[in-house]
Structure formats: C-alpha cells, structure tokens
Image (tube, rainbow, N blue to C red):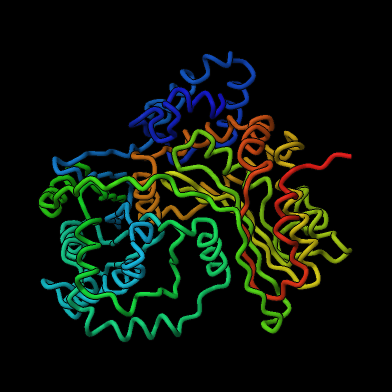
Amino acid sequence: FSPVVLGQHSHSQFGHFCPNNHLPQTMSAAVLNVLGRQLRGAVPRGCRSAMTQTLAEPMAWNQTPAVVTMLPNGVRVATKETFGEVASVGVFLNVGTRDETKETAGAVHLIEQLALTGTVKRPKAKLESEVESLGATLSMNSGREQSSYTMSVMKGDLKQGVEILADLVTSPGLNNLAKEKEGILRKLEEREVPTRQVIDDRLHACAFRDYPLGFSTVGPYDNIGSLTEAHLKSYVDVNYTAENMVIAASGPLKHEELVKLVSASFGSIKAGAPKSGTGKPYFCGAELLYRNDEMGPTAYIAVGWEGVPWRSPDAVTFMVMQHVIGSYKKNSGLVPGNISGNRVINNVANKMAVGCADSFEAFSYFYKDTGMFGFYIECDEVAVEHAVGELMFGMNLLSFSVTDEEIERAKRELKAALFSQPTSAEASCAELGKQMLAYGRGVPPAEMMLRIEGVDAEEVKRVAWKYLNDNEISATALGPLHGFPQYYDLRRATVMHRY
C-alpha cells in the first residue's frame, strides 16, 4: 500500500484512518517487512487499503488496545493496559506558546514554573510531602502546541494520583506569582540554553514571524516582567478547557476504573468558547543571522522548508526523508562517516579530505496545520560554505535521485528510532497522550510499520518535488558566518541546475 491510498481512504487525514484499531507492542519487524513487500508487489494498487486495514486490526496481532472514552463534557480518557507495578497517568493539553498573544508572551513559561509551587488545596510543602510519601514522580512540560502534567505512581495509588493532577490543572498555583516571580525571572536570565534549542527557536521566529507559532519557547520574553496573575488566569481560563484535554494512562489499570476517577475529578471542567480562526501560519522565506566572529571557531546553522501537519497523508514520507538525510557526528558511531553508505554523510565526512562539519542532523516537525522540515549543522568557520552546500545538495537530491537501497536503509533507521524507545509506563503514557492530541487516537505500532513500508523511492521523489523543490526556505545562523552564502544563492540551491 502507499500513503496516498491510505490518505484517500481516510479523507486525507492520517489520524482518521482505521479508527479505534489496536495492535501489538512487540512485533517482528521482519514479518512486517515481508507483509509490506507482498502488499506492494502482489496486490493491485486499488485493493491495498482494504487489505492493509485488515492487517492492522487488533485481533490479527493480539495487542493490548488503546481504549478511548469521551466524557459528556468533552474530556477524553485513553488507557493502555500493561503489566507491572507502576502506573503512569497524565493530563495532556492541546495548548502551548502558540496560544499566547503578544501581550501574554511568556505566560506558558510562568505557568510551567508555577506548576509545582502548590495550589490552594495543596500548598508546596504539602504537595511535596504527599508526592514523596507515594514514592511518585511528578513533572510538567510545555511546548509550542502541547503541554502535559504527568505522574507515575504505584498501581494502588492511582486514585490519589488523579486527584493531585486534577488539583494542579484546575487550580494551578497562579496566586504564587507575586512571591515566585523574582526567582523565576532571575533563573531565566542565568540559565544556560543549549545552542541547538536557541537556533531552533530562532528558526521558528524567522519562518513564522507574524504568528504565535514563531513565539519563543526558551526566552527571552519581551513582556514577561509585566505579566500579572490576571494575565495567567485569563490564559488558563481560555485554554485549559475540556475539549483541549486528554487524560492518558498506561500500566496495570482498568479503563473503566480510570474513567470513573476522571469523571469525579475532571467532570466539572467546562468546554471553552469557539476560538476565532486565525488561519494557517504563513511560512516566510527569509534569513535571520547573528554573526559573531569572537564567540569561537564553530558556526551553528539551520535551514528549514515548510512541511506538513500531523495528519497529512505525506507525514510518514517526511519521516522517511528525515532518515534518508540522517544525522552525523564526527569521530563517533559504529561506522566512520567517510565509509558510510549514506550519501550525505559520506560527502560531508570526505569533503576537503577532513570533513566539512562536526555534526549535522535532519529534522521534521509536525504541527496542527503546518510543519517544518530541514537540517541543523555545527561546523568550523572555514567550512561553512561547504557544509551548507553539501546539505542543500542532499536535500535537492530527494526530488531527483533517490535509490531503493537508500529508502530501505532509511526505513530501517526510522523503525529503530520509533520502536527502540524506553518501554516504561511513563514513556508509554507520554506517547499515548501525544498521539491522542495529534491524531485523536492511539496509533498502533503495527499500523505505523505498515505505513512506513508503503513508502518507496518514487513516493519520496513525489513528496520532495512537491514540498522542497524550488520552494521558499527560512535560514538562521549564529557565530563566525563570513562564509555563509547569500540568501539569493541559498534559495537558488533549492533547484537542480543541469548543464
């Protein structure tokens, strides 16, 4: 089968294909590879989606299902029952920095920092004591589109864990802002942010400069000093609503039990008012350079193209394309870069006989209605032009010259990256919550494997030609950039010049 056929079957939405199917966590990749090849080779193209759906049925693989229930107020409850003694439960919110305004930029950071400072019902000392007495772990994370409160507890303490999470979400410690604000701002100024995160932040600011999707997630925030408790309360009231909320859990628990606990703790949360549509963020082709020849010999560079949303039928192809380009770190890894079978890695490692980059990686970010695909480089100042040129050429080749061998290698690496992650209850809960927000359901591993198997060289060429070839790019860089190409030349490098 191909993702195009799947997309048509699912009304061009990845998340709506074959709803409510559930497949095994443990499955032989070799078996799925054989199934995928047989599907592509033996079954007429028009019949593949039906057979693929049959192969993705839970009864075919005897997998623990991800069961989903929607409460009357719109809160969704998703569970995946596993064996063990520890259960992990989380509140996943479809909100992040994208839901800020220019006046409230920085609100998400403040809420994240205030999350564990205590609530009206549970002051900080009592909250810490209660969590410690349970032997539990509690964390809060936020991003551009998603935020989460997660807690791992022993299976007998699930009820108390749900009650604590409900207290944190429905009554966050916003009243602690006055006494905590000075410490939060000082910590924000003093903390060291990895350069990789800074470059990623600036690339979003450059590409989506006129939209909240481009707002900073690492700081500095222009108006954070002027934000008040009223600003934060307004943000919470508007965004922490029932339709934006998913309660996900993984571990030795029963779905019906969790539904009862969530109904008691989250059943009173009201749905929010419909938001006025702002439309899809406009991707701006531009560059944002911070040249500093005195910060050391290493230049940090990122270039991005507009990608696709989570539910695009081309999303899986972008995942494969990311691994066609791959990632590289000099003098590390099992296979030296100068003999790597990856063309981009091989070219970078052998350039100028010593290599032209210390490291690089391709990335692919998915959002509700858009995405970003590109690469990040760390290289010596004398090799900037060569490193950028090699990566741009590698991206360009995706539209014209991709072999089946490269695609098979990329698919193997993608499967390894997806399914070699930690298998703890906490990791399983986080993945389920993320999928519920992105797709509206849990995506079984077997289904994802079959979708990956449906990608071939021709599909990669089609998608790359559509989204990358002769399309706008956004670029940002930091450090000694005297060798960085002019934006005009960078833009011309998105097309193939034939002589």
Please give the count of numbered marks on the rendered protein.
0
Q: Is residue 91 visible?
A: yes
Left or right position of 449 against 21? right
- Residue 340: where, in percent of width, then height? 78, 52
Where 453 sits versus 133, above or below?
Answer: above
Q: Write the residue at 46% across / 81% down.
A: 191
Q: Residue 302 location in percent, x, y?
A: 63, 61
For the question of whether residue 157 can be seen, the reply is no
Query: Looking at the rendering, which quadrant does residue 117 occupy?
Result: bottom left
Identify the image quadrant of the N terminus: top right
Residue at point 85% right, 66% down? 354
Q: Position of residue 18 (x, y in %)?
A: 39, 27
Q: Is residue 163 left or right of residue 487?
A: left
| Residue beneath the point at 39% across and 83% down | 187
- Relative to 166, residue 2 above or below: above
Q: Is residue 295 left or right of residue 309?
A: right
Q: Considering the image in quadrants, where does the C terminus appear?
A: top right
Judging depth in this view, the residue of 419 and 107 nearest the camera is 107
Q: Return the residue nearer the eye: 280 or 241.
A: 280
Q: Position of residue 221 (x, y in %)?
A: 41, 73
Residue 489 is drawn in which quadrant? Answer: bottom right
Q: Residue at x 38, y 49 (%)?
A: 434
Q: Nearer the viewer, residue 300 or 78?
A: 300
Which residue is nearer to you in this view: 30 or 442? 442
